[in-house]
Image: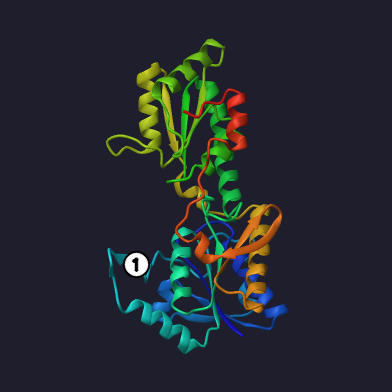
Amino acid sequence: MKIGILTSGGDCPGINATIRGVCKTAINYYGMEVYGIHSGFRGLLDNDVIPLTESSLTGLLNMGGTILGTSREKPFRRRGNVAMSEDKPAMLLNTIHERGLDCIVCIGGNGTLKTAAKLQEAGVNVVSIPKTIDNDVWGTDISFGFDSAVSIATDAIDRLHSTASSHQRVMVIEVMGHKAGWIALYSGMAGGGDIILLPEIPFDMHRIGDTIINRLKKGKPYSIVVVAEGIPTRDGKKAAQFIAEEIEYETGFETRETVLGYIQRGGSPTAFDRNLATRMGGHATELIAQGQFGRMVALQGDVIGSIPLQETAGKLKLVTENHDLIIQGRRMGVCFG
């Protein structure tokens, strides 16, 4: 059996560990042939496909990024009811047929999953593995990359505590998360944030200002504010800049902002993400061997399983106010806006 594997969308820690998990299982246990597709779906358009062997997989477990490269190519994109390109889907199918690929493993986030579902509808055997630091893929409790991003963000918050305390300032740190605030929630709570702002929960600047002033009255002259990049702002300002300016206006306290940006995506994956990626990659290969196509690998509880690809494509997993970390945070005095 011949399988192709591609990585699409943004990079994140653990992609290479997933590639390794798929390929080593496919080659060593099932005796399959594996082909790497460069630059996501663009590689299928360009017929940029290479064989992967045992030697191709050396050193991948702890390596950041993706050896296959990535892109945000969306070959099935439509504008209204009109396809952006009538040729691209045919080009994809032609490459898959020409290369004799029996299945395509798609590693990616929400955009990739939507494209993978379209590929399945076009008659291609597809298995997907969720990848995103934002942890917003519906149907899986955790996506690999999330734990690594939270660890990086938490370390940054830890470091800001000492500066904030020394200078008696308010420090605002912006982490990734356009629509979902999972990184802000988990790193904010792990890093002892005093105020945590998520895209899913409305905030009131007066309440935030009161929280900071009340902390001062209790003998706490500094505060740590963790914000997700996707919170609503005015005048096109970045989240951290907007919140820092509003806090200074509300309280008169000196406030500084820090934007972590792409640092959260880079570097080696945590041990948790390496093991999750390995398990997910292995299960994807098991699905292929059993002929179970059109599915996304998912972690549910402690069990690696799968769900129909059509169930997750186009959906987002968002933070809700009844999440136990938010409930516990509020009990401890953390302000969520």
Q: Camera-side residue: 226 or 330?
A: 330
Q: Residue 283: which quarter of the image?
A: bottom right
Q: Amino acid at mark 1?
A: Arg
Whole-percent x and y of residue 102?
55, 83
Whole-percent x and y of residue 83?
29, 71
Residue 204 makes an appearance in the image: yes
Whole-percent x and y of residue 86?
30, 77
Residue 252 relative to residue 12: left or right = left
**Residue 323 vertical position relative to residue 22 in the rendered view, above or below:** above
Q: Residue at x 53, y 16 (%)?
A: 215
For disc 1, the marked residue is 77
Secondary element at tag 1? loop
Residue 234 relative to residue 262: left or right = left
Residue 10 makes an appearance in the image: no
Residue 123 relative to residue 277: left or right = left
Q: How is the image coloured?
A: rainbow
Q: Residue at x 51, y 20 (%)?
A: 222
Whole-percent x and y of residue 160?
53, 31
Q: Residue at x 46, y 50 (%)?
A: 262
* Label 1 Cα crowd, 10 Å radius (few <14 / some 14-19 / many 20+): some
Q: Residue at x 51, y 23 (%)?
A: 223
**Residue 146 vertical position relative to residue 181 in the rendered view, above or below:** below
Q: How many marks?
A: 1
Q: Quadrant of the N terminus?
A: bottom right
Which residue is outermost to the top?
217
